[in-house]
Amino acid sequence: MTKIAITGLNGVIGKILAEELSKNMQIIDLFHTEKYSGRAIIQKHIKLDLLKKDKIPEVLREAEPDVIVHLAAITHIDRCEKDKKNGEKGVVWKTNVEATSEIAKYCAKQNIQLVFLSTECVFDGKQKYFSENSKKNPINWYGKTKSEAEDIVLSSSVPAAIIRSVVAYHKNDSEKTIYGKILKELKSRGNIEVVSDQRFTPTYTYDIVKAIKIVMKKKMKGIFHVSPTKIMSPYELAVLIAKTNKFPRGSVKKTSISSYYDRKRASLRLRNSSLLGRKTNSMLKFTPRNPEDVL
């Protein structure tokens, strides 16, 4: 039976992936702080401290996986930016870049597949949309570290698939994704203000998991943009969430990115983080669903 070692298993995507894969594969939980706490059957829990890069090969040898799915990262833009002053000695760089490098080296040495979850933040948000081949130009430290990690993975001899998606949402969680956060605010306050001058392609968690499963099964390599065809604003998504949960018309108000954040934080956010996935959709033979279809 195939053994899949997964980092970041306690995240929303990790939990869904574990439930999907554990039906016919052995799942190894490579946990950083807390063991996986979901419903899937886990073959083994092994602590993997991503900050101790010298220990990573030893831990991976203990796991003996056939495939590694690397989901774990420090992703909060503001938290990452605070650590930028520490550069390559910082926690964010060590976690997002150095740990990924060590995992890639192990996969290359053992000739096993690596599936790496990346982000739209490798781009600058200044184009109408970004394809798999668009030039990278990150405007925040989070995007910079993920871009560096991508380059390391792609320049190595590891058979790797890099998955990029935008703002994963899950309609059944309480507040772990944008859906739950918006719904919580609506329930507690009755009305909310949401940014209307950003554009993005929010992606359903189950579609991201489906893409990961396909690239694993077919041992596919390269960069894959997993995103729906509908480009919208956070405000439009919030209106849809309010409508489907039967909140009154007008419970969602428009605001600008510069009003929602202070000037510095606003400058770190992409004005347009829309990913174009036509090439990916053709290769994977499926198109991620638009929010209207999911909700």
Image: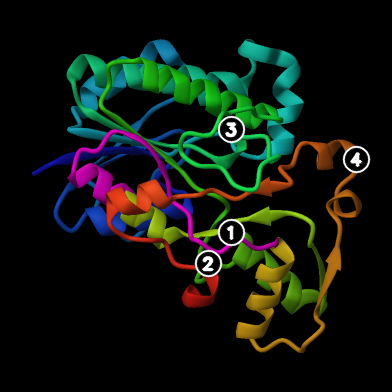
**Residue tagged 2:** 173
Q: CA distance from mark 4 to mark 3?
A: 21 Å
Residue type indicated by callout 1: Thr
Q: Secondary structure at mark 3?
A: helix
Residue type indicated by callout 3: Val
Q: Secondary structure at mark 1?
A: loop
- Please state which of the two labelled residues, at mark 3 or mark 2, is closer to the viewer: 3
- Check residue 122 in the rendering and tell me which mark sits there, or answer none: 3
**CB within 8 Å, label 2 to label 1:** yes
Residue 172 image position (x, y, % from top left):
50, 71
**CB within 8 Å, label 3 to label 2:** no
Q: Secondary structure at mark 4?
A: helix
**Residue tagged 1:** 177
**Can residue 219 be seen in this snapshot?**
yes
Going from the N terminus, do you reach mark 3 or mark 2 first? 3
- Please state which of the two labelled residues, at mark 1 or mark 3, is closer to the viewer: 3
Going from the N terminus, do you reach mark 2 or mark 4 first? 2
Within 10 Å of disc 2 (Cα), the crowding (few <14, some 14-19, many 20+) is few
User: Could you tell me which residue is drawn at 41 percent across and 51 percent down?
Assistant: 278
Going from the N terminus, do you reach mark 4 or mark 3 first? 3
Q: Secondary structure at mark 2?
A: loop
**Residue tagged 4:** 263
**Rendered position, 60 above or below 125:** above
Magenta part of the protein: which range?
A: 212-233
**Can residue 17 be seen in this snapshot?**
no
Q: CA distance from mark 2 to mark 4?
A: 31 Å
Within 10 Å of disc 4 (Cα), the crowding (few <14, some 14-19, many 20+) is few
**CB within 8 Å, label 4 to label 3:** no
